[in-house]
Amino acid sequence: MRKACVQPLDERSDGSRLIARGGVLGMQTKGSHGFGYYKPRTSFPPAPKQAEYIAVSIQLSRRVQRVKPSPTMAATARAARLKAEGRDIISLTAGEPDFATPTEAAEAGIAAIRDGATRYTDVGGTTELKQAICDKFAADNHLHYNRAQILVSCGAKQTLFNLCMAVLDPGDEAIIPAPYWVSYPDMVRLADATPVIVDTTIETGYKLTPRQLAAAITPATRLLLINSPCNPTGAAYSRLEWQQLGEVLAAHPRVLIGTDDIYEKIWWADEPFSTLAEVCPALYERTITINGVSKSHAMTGWRIGYCGGPAEIITAMATIQGQSTSNPSSVSQRAALAALRGDQRCVADMNAEYQRRHDFFIPALAALPGFECRRAEGSFYAFVRITGALQRLGLADDQAFCDRLLETEGLALVPGSGFGAPGHVRLSFATSRAQLEAALERLGRFLRSA
């Protein structure tokens, strides 16, 4: 660590000094308590009649210049802005439940405020919440962790970011199947590593195959990030598919795996949900299983995510968190504890409604001209290949499609290119049946306008 010493470079007639440091210019006036040093002075010459302005040049880090703003956030914000201007807008962009937080969890948060549980907690979460997470993993996923193997963070997004920062170095590679959640590649870049994107298609169910995984692994591979059920496709891996991927990974002991299970409870596939470390116990010691209450319990704004994994990695992730945000909100932790410990019928009820919407919406989308859409195993998204529609409408790409649709029909979708899948769009059905019916009407009118 070094101490910076700022020296004045020039003295002007009005008694102020011009200070230049690191490409940023500032002013220091004698007698003030600004930066640099000062010398008291009892009188000053009159200020110049016309103010003098100095251009300020701010250079951002190369790291942040590698990162792109979230396309889902941008699409949601644009739809909200148009709606605020008085436009009749239907937005199917949001990636969050449209249900209220369960009463038991909300009341626990209110009680935490009233009881004064509003102070710092341990960086990695309270003992009570960590134990509830251990119990959840054991009951739902047959994964057995102790509290030293659990980290609670400000949402699963922070959990994933902590993981990338804790295990990736410059020169490392992280394998990410596409379509992917928009933040994965940029998190890898922020850790100064290289995302390796492996494309999947509707023909393979938007899932990574063992052959693709084996071909993508190199001596530089350090991490595999995989999301099941997936945002944006709704695709999920079966036990057999996990076993097949696990056989490939078993031959590469340097590769860590981050499994993002945030949509675990939004599930209607023929077989029960499973996760990699559960199906492949030999990979338990190098798998970080990530989850949270945002999607399962409609608690996106409470910002509680968590993970279980090897104690050494969890400790390193907690160190990263301790120097960034410190602990998650104490109030939110109380609410999450109530959500995990409480009656889970509300979770099942929400899931049943998502499935009803899915069963209505997916076939209706697939019947539209130029649209190709597969059934999902979970999540609340429809992912549509629109190459036929682009040709019909004479549009260049999925971004142009979404722009024209919003402009002419007031319907907001998210372009698939933001998920690493050009020629697709994502639609969220985390909204009412009436909104979905209206959206289908607008889509049909738009597609028939060619």
Image: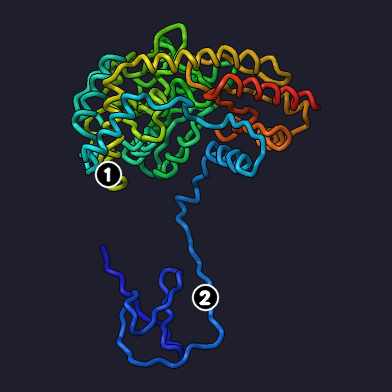
Tell me the SS state at disc 2: loop
The image position of residue 330, as x and y in percent, is 26, 38
Q: Residue furthest top?
A: 270
Which of the image's four quarters has the C terminus?
Answer: top right
How many numbered discs? 2
Up the image or down, 210 lies above or below 331; here it is above
Residue at horizontal 39 percent and vertical 23 percent from the top = 296
Residue at horizontal 46 percent and vertical 13 percent from the top = 352
Q: Residue furthest front?
A: 114
> Disc 1 designates what residue?
326
Amino acid type for the residue under numbered disc 1: Ser
Amino acid type for the residue under numbered disc 2: Ile
Q: Residues within 10 Å of mark 2 (few under 14, many from 20)?
A: few
Distance from Cα at disc 1 to Cα at disc 2: 38 Å
Residue at horizontal 26 percent and vertical 24 percent from the top = 133
Q: Counting residues from the N terminus, which is met first, the one under dot 1 or under dot 2?
A: 2
The image position of residue 341, as x and y in percent, is 26, 21
Nearest the camera: 26 or 256?
A: 26
Q: Do the numbered discs 1 and 2 sit on residues whose CB atoms are within 8 Å?
A: no
Residue 104 in view of the camera: yes
Tell me the SS state at disc 1: loop
> Disc 2 designates what residue?
54
When asked about the image quadrant of residue 7, the answer is bottom left
Q: Residue furthest right?
A: 450
Nearest the camera: 206 or 273?
A: 273
Nearest the camera: 434 or 57?
A: 434
Nearest the camera: 340 or 415?
A: 340
When asked about the image quadrant of residue 312, the answer is top left
**Where residue 366 is drawn, which disc sits there?**
none
Up the image or down, 33 lies above or below 192; here it is below
